[in-house]
Image (cartoon, rainbow, N blue to C red):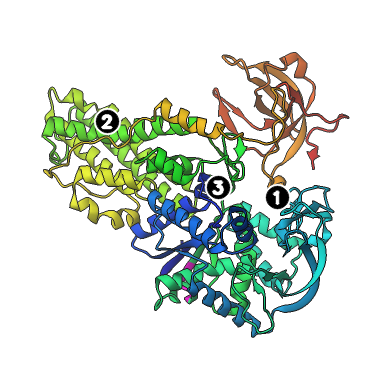
Amino acid sequence: MTDFKRYTITAALPYANGPLHIGHIAGAYLPADTYVRYLRLKGEDVAFICGSDEHGVAITLGARKEGVTPRAFVDKYHQLMKKAFEDFGIAFDIYSRTSNPVHYETAQEFFKTIYDQNLFIEETSDQYYDEQEGIFLADRYIIGTCPNCGNPNAYGDQCEKCGTSLSPKQLINPRSTVSGKAPILKPTKHWYFPLDKFESWLKDWLIEGHKDWKTNVYGQCKSWLDQGLQPRSITRDLDWGIPVPLPDAKGKVLYVWFDAPIGYISATKEWKPNDWQKYWKDPETRLIHFIGKDNIVFHCIIFPSMLKATGEYILPDNVPANEFLNLEGEKLSTSRNHAVWLHEYLLDLPGRRDELRYVLNSISPETKDADFTWKDYQQKVNSELVAILGNFVNRVMVLTWKYFDGKVPSEHELPGTDERRKRILALYNQAHNDLNKSVKDMADAIKNFRFREAQFQMMNLSRIGNKFLADTEPWKLAKEDMEAVGCILNYALTVVGNIALACEPFLPDGAASIRKQLNSELLEQSRKKFWEKEELVHVVPQHHQLGKAELLYRNVEDADMEKQVARLKKTPATTSAPATENAIKPLKPEIVFDDFGKLDIRIGTVVSAEKMEKSNKLLKLQVDDGFGVRTILSGIAQHYTPEDIAGKQVTFIANLAPRKMMGTESQGMILMAEDKDGKLRLVRPIDDVAPGSQVS
């Protein structure tokens, strides 16, 4: 990580038209909060910025539906989201809103700065108008048939099926999503931002300069730039929004995609009115945007171009966008109420914030969509938070109280040369090396925005600690060698203290509980040292009096989960036709061509096949891949006998990393098609081809 003087961390401004659900939290806010806590523990100067996005057609339509003013509508959801963030412990420096006066001033100044450079294009053109509703329609409120792939529900700015960038006039048979009627074209004047003029610069800055960005972010940006950029309208005909600051722009407001990201800057101004510029204009400040994948184009292409156009602001150094979170196998849906709402979770399961943080981090959709289930939630809490982390901390505390009245035993070298003491010393050395490696791996993963891996390494400290206790067995040694018991528990308490430090970005409530139990000022003073050195530090002085032992976490009961599942079942998880036992599985999330291009798919011929011993599923295949013979293990024994498959041609992934199964290394993966009845079928060429032929 390059050294910076300070960090500006933003989390996507949530739209103020509904409450927050766990998909929002997993996508942008939990990763951002985890990273910010890490930076603060290192003593970095950090601005953590967010706020409610309160303009746009969706706000006016939502207010109309509820029979209230747009202001009353956004007030309701702003307060709901702000409180949910606070109750969940997301530690923003400021949570602002785009309806604040400081934001109006900042956005208008931003517009004027670019306008005065004669960059905007002023144009009167025919735009779609919903006669029944009396409104001009934003691109996302027009749907029709995609001219590229035939998708009947493509949006006016993009087809989400094929990924093609569109304009509303390209749609076939367009219709309004507000009234369902066919809109008419009506002339209106607007101002356009010339994205096409920034295309060459974007290719140099982004495509050439940020190849280290996450593949899902980089791939989507490259796809947009490869298609070519077009000027984008930055104004709209609305009576709710930021007025365009020009004398001939009556009734025009700034379009929400132009106005919203400026909210990061205006919120920083609100937070630090006399000192905000260093967080946005000093090149030694690192700007990082945490967002969901639906915001990639705005934060990686449009907003950077806006910042570049002003000539004053720093540009994002990274945009670690996450994919989407599904719920119980279905897409999260606010309209169908198929969601776990954050404010309801906090009411239903009070005092269990860490549990949700832990589960969402463990399934974080960092590179592909992930699925949240209440069954998995219960399993992760009970078998990991309780049985691994909580168990280790409690065992150490209870044993110290039992044998040493809650005082940290003496720290000294194990005396003597007998085999038992040599063994304990060897176990100590092994544990110490393993613990330091996990701390280093955890810190490296956080720096590179791999929070799933980082949390795994954090939990690994407790796994290693549990193993150290199980191997040294201080409860047995207590009968004859209390000095050895003291050495073991002294070190175990050091591990507990370091776990408290490691927990802080992930499990702040658990970390606070451990700190309370250890009751050590040295622990409080060691935070920065731990994260800077990235190794175990001394945290509990000998003879120090510990606090009372308490359970960190408690098991999730079946009744708690049944209540949550029942809540979901009140609203059907899908509005489509009922699924049958033989339904074809839904399509997986969309990928870009670069993802597919990484796969080396080839045709091979099965030279021989045999069943793997002690396995009912695996066949061991020897496959001629055109270069030699490789071993591939395939789970098809219940669908094919060795005689069925020997001599047949198969399709396989040739560049899959080798994997050991049941003592045998598998050097590829056979591709199969699973029919709707669950039967596996070989994917084969119609005609035989030479082994090693590539599928493209």
Vertical relation: 178 (above or below) 114 = above
Residue 12 visible: no
* The furthest residue to the right: 687
Q: Nearer the viewer, residue 69 or 423?
A: 69
Q: Where's residue 171, x and y in %?
A: 82, 56
Determine contact: label 3, label 2, CB under 8 Å.
Answer: no
- Residue 287 lies, in percent from the top left, at 50, 66
Most common SS among magenta residues:
loop
Q: Amino acid at mark 2?
A: Leu
Residue 366's label in the rendered image is: 3
Q: Residue at x 78, y 36 (%)?
A: 692
Between discs 3 and 2, the one toward the N terminus: 3
Q: CA distance from mark 2 to mark 1?
A: 48 Å
Check disc 1: other Cα within 10 Å, few if <14, some if 14-19, many if 20+. Answer: some
Q: Residue at x 73, y 21 (%)?
A: 677
Cα distance, mark 3 to mark 2?
34 Å
- Residue 427 lies left or right of residue 445; in this view the side is left
Element at label 2: helix
Q: Which residues are magenta?
A: 282-286
Where is residue 585 shown, x and y percent of the image? 69, 31
Q: In this orientation, which residue lies closer to the viewer: 37 or 179?
A: 179
Closer to viewer: mark 2 or mark 1: 1
Q: Which residue is mark 1?
A: 592
Queried whether the magenta region covers residue 212, the answer comes back as no
> On the image, numbered disc 2 is attached to which residue?
469
Question: Magenta stretch: residue 284 in it?
Answer: yes
**Secondary structure beneath label 1:** loop
Q: Does 417 appear above or below 513?
A: above
- Of the 4 image quadrants, the one containing the C terminus is top right
Kind of residue indicated by mark 3: Glu
